[in-house]
Amino acid sequence: MDAEAFFNGVDARSRRVETPCGDGHMVWRIWGQGAPLVFIHGGAGAWSHWIRNIPEFEGGRMVIAPDLPGLGESASPPKPYTPESIAKIAADGLHHLLPPGAQFDMVGFSFGGMISGLMASLHGARVRTLTLMGPSGLGGQFGNIRPPVRLPQGGTQEELAAAHRHNLAAIMLHDPAKIDDLAMHVQAINAPRTRVLSPEHAMSEKLLNALREIPARVCSIWGEFDISSPHLQHRRDVIADVHPSAEFYIIPGAGHWVQYEAADETNALLRKFIA
């Protein structure tokens, strides 16, 4: 597979829409037709965190994937920004994109898991299902993580590639063999555009508090070796405490970017949950 050609092909099939974001615009991409399925990406990412999931669903659903404020191609949010203010911008954007009262399914990854929960608390009954993949904002600790490295300013292509590979291994992917050309291409495009820092909110309970107010059916999907993996039982317990009917799945052998590293298994679980 030619990674750049595959990436560009998925992008080219989308329709680009812009909604207000501070002094600029939040960028959304939309594929296909049908019941809306909204993907919210993680920190230092963009729509392409879902590069291996969009093709699975675009044939029968309207797949909607934004670049969150301050990430990807979207404008930065007004300062001082918070997860709540970012979620409000994104939630307002969905009001522009969807007909009044239209229900949708939403999926959030990592920082986007917290943001999707906050968005769901604003949209209420419009959110039919909420699927969280390795979400932050549940309190507790992280353990299965190595310190990332800064991208070298003015570095050579080899130095930049080494930094991207290190960071993918340190945070995102468990199996080194899964750090393929497509993962590297996604990381190389997204990471330098990061203007909103998400780790400072990761151990908050912002998602946990939002879940108390969400009427939607809830599911969470985790890689066995997620950055939270030493504390997955804590995650299971706190979610069950505030949302007793929530479903909880662990995919063996996968890391934090579970929907990429174990795309087939993740897509199957998601398809079953939102059916």
Image: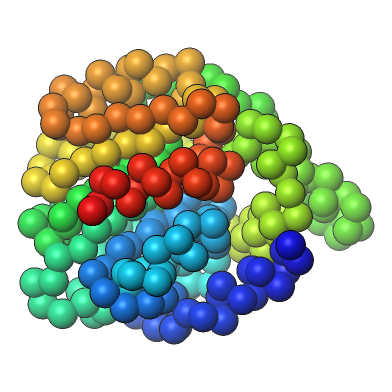
Q: Is residue 249 left or right of residue 166?
A: left
Front-lying residue, 77 or 253 = 253
Query: Would residue 28 be seen by someone viewing this image from the given angle?
Result: no
Is residue 274 visible in the rendered image? The answer is yes
In this picture, is 68 found above or below 29? above
In terms of depth relative to the viewer, which is nearer, 249 or 160?
Answer: 249
Q: Is residue 199 above or below residue 94?
A: above
Q: Where residue 265 sits: x, y (%)?
A: 46, 41
- Report the front residue among 261 and 213: 261
Q: Residue at x 26, y 68 (%)?
A: 36
* Picture coordinates of residue 249, whole percent (x, y): 35, 30
> What residue appears at the point 55 percent right and 60 percent down from the top-left corner?
51
Q: Give residue 190's position: percent from left, percent from top.
A: 62, 60
Q: How is the image coloured?
A: rainbow
Q: Residue at x 16, y 44 (%)?
A: 217
Q: Is residue 66 left or right of residue 209?
A: right
Name the quadrant of the N terminus. Answer: bottom right
Pick whichever, 61 or 186, lies toward us: 61
* Number of marks present in the image shown: 0
Judge from the rendering whether residue 62 lies leftward or rightward of residue 152; answer left or right: left
Q: Where 168 sits versus 51, above or below?
A: above
Give the image location of residue 273, x and y in percent.
26, 46
Residue at (61% x, 76% y) in the render: 9
